[in-house]
Amino acid sequence: MAAAAAAKIAPSMLSSDFANLAAEADRMVRLGADWLHMDIMDGHFVPNLTIGAPVIQSLRKHTKAYLDCHLMVTNPSDYVEPLAKAGASGFTFHIEVSRDNWQELIESIKAKGMRPGVSLRPGTPVEEVFPLVEAENPVELVLVMTVEPGFGGQKFMPEMMEKVCALRKKYPSLDIEVDGGLGPSTIDVAASAGANCIVAGSSIFGAAEPGEVISALRKSVEGSQNKS
């Protein structure tokens, strides 16, 4: 039987104090974060405009952390080289803009030394990403959006857990990430569905004790894995 994918807690830096990004990244790592989740939005695929390669490059000088980059952009292939040069670790693109060129995209991401992932919006059927996981040159992570991408602080959509369950059933050792509205009140349903990579923004950065929230998220994932 395939080994369970390890729990990874990824604070969403979109909720951090951007004026003190290096200090916030350091604080999250010290409090137990496995990854730092970086939301890259182009103002086109989603209405919000956030950060790009220059900010990743600046942050990389101050941290050795795994920078889990989620590309909410219309042309992900344009970002592969700049992000690789900037020091991105993971490069997760959206299936909705990559239906025709995902093979080439995965290849270029891997060639640049980054880890490829694919994400899907709430309205996109989970079946669309199966070929990318089963390809000869596959993605190594699937990110199931549990809110409509674009803005932090939205309410978790529990109906998205059907996608997580379907993925976990088919791919026992795949990294399955969830993003949107995750926190102490919603983690158990995500963990029991099979998610092992947890992105959380407001619930971590807005907490009086963010380290306790990170620890609670991890315990829930590990507890669910021990039961299954």
Image: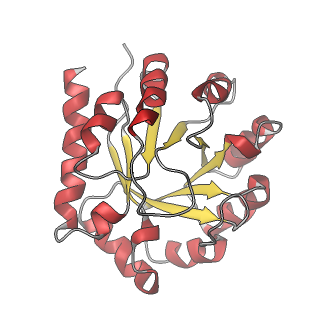
Indicate the position of residue 227 as horizontal and vertical percent values.
Answer: 19, 22
Image-based side of 68 in relation to 213, left or right: right
Q: Which residue occupies 23% across, 64% down?
A: 31
Quarter holding the C terminus is top left
Q: Can residue 64 be seen in this view?
A: no
Q: Residue at x 78, y 53 (%)?
A: 77
Q: Residue at x 76, y 42 (%)?
A: 98
Q: In this view, does 21 lie to the left or right of 54?
A: left
- Name the foreground residue: 52 vs 15: 15
**Residue at the extreme bottom of the image, as rendered:** 19
Q: Identify the coloring.
A: secondary structure
Vertically, is 124 above or below 9?
A: above
Residue sitting nearer the eye, 17 or 43: 43
Name above or below for residue 103 compared with residue 173. below
Please provide percent x and percent y for residue 179: 44, 49
Instruction: Report the number of numbered marks.
Output: 0
**Would residue 127 be seen by someone viewing this image from the given angle?**
yes
Relative to the observer, which residue lies in front, 17 or 141?
Answer: 17
Question: Quick check: 59 above or below 102?
Answer: below
Residue 38, position in %: x, y?
51, 63
Which residue of the protein is positioned furthest toward the top in this rendering?
A: 1
What is the x, y in percent for residue 33?
Answer: 31, 58
Left or right: residue 31 versus residue 168 is left
Q: Of 101 and 50, which appears nearest the observer?
A: 50
Q: In which quarter of the image is the N terminus?
A: top left
Residue 194, located in which quarter of the rendered image? Answer: top left
Q: Quadrant of residue 165?
A: top left
